[in-house]
């Protein structure tokens, strides 16, 4: 039943698309634009739905990329902390640890405690 309905809808949509040039031509004779017709409203709505889907997909992709970047940054930060802890255990100077890891004195002091 659903498949028959979908097929019928596809046929109707194809017919509507075929009628668009005729409606545009005839509508201009009586002073109507395509947007003033049912077809025009349908096509505008279809364009809005498509734009919304594309925008959503674009937003999801941007979110993924941002999440990946944040994950990489977090991983680098954890690696710096891990390195600082190991260097502290080896009694390496505070200055050398700062230079090697890029961490601040305060961050390294917190790791000592």
Image: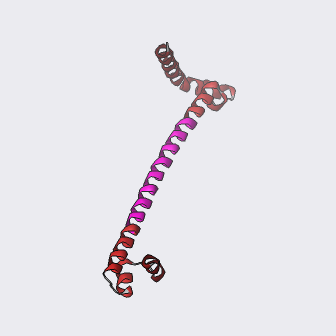
Q: Quadrant of the C terminus?
A: bottom left
Residue 31 quadrant: top right
- The residue range painted magenta reads 47-76
In this rendering, would 100 be left or right of 106?
left
Q: Nearer the viewer, residue 65 or 36?
A: 65
Residue 112, image x and y in percent?
A: 42, 79
Residue 21 quadrant: top right
Identity of the residue drawn at 46% across and 16% down: 3
Residue 74 quadrant: bottom left
For the stretch drawn in magenta, the main secondary structure is helix
Identity of the residue drawn at 51% across and 15% down: 5
Q: Nearer the viewer, residue 111 or 31?
A: 111
In this rendering, would 4 be left or right of 42?
left
List the single residue furthest toward the left: 90
Q: Does the stretch in magenta take in 12? A: no
Q: Is residue 1 above or below residue 112?
A: above
Q: Does the stretch in magenta take in 59? A: yes
List the single residue furthest toward the right: 31
Residue 38, image x and y in percent?
A: 64, 25
Identity of the residue drawn at 33% across and 75% down: 86
In this rendering, would 23 be left or right of 71?
right
Q: Is residue 7 above or below residue 107?
A: above
């Amino acid at each position: 039943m659903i498949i028959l309905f979908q097929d019928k809808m596809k046929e109707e949509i194809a017919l509507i698309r075929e009628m668009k040039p005729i409606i545009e031509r005839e509508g201009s004779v009586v002073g109507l634009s395509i947007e003033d017709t049912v077809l025009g409203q349908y096509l505008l709505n279809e364009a809005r739905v498509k734009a919304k889907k594309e925008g959503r997909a674009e937003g999801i992709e941007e979110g993924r990329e941002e999440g990946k970047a944040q994950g990489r940054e977090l991983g680098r930060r954890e690696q710096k902390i891990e390195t600082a802890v190991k260097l502290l255990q080896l009694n390496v100077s505070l200055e050398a640890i700062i230079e090697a890891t890029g961490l601040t004195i305060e961050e390294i002091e917190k790791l000592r405690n």
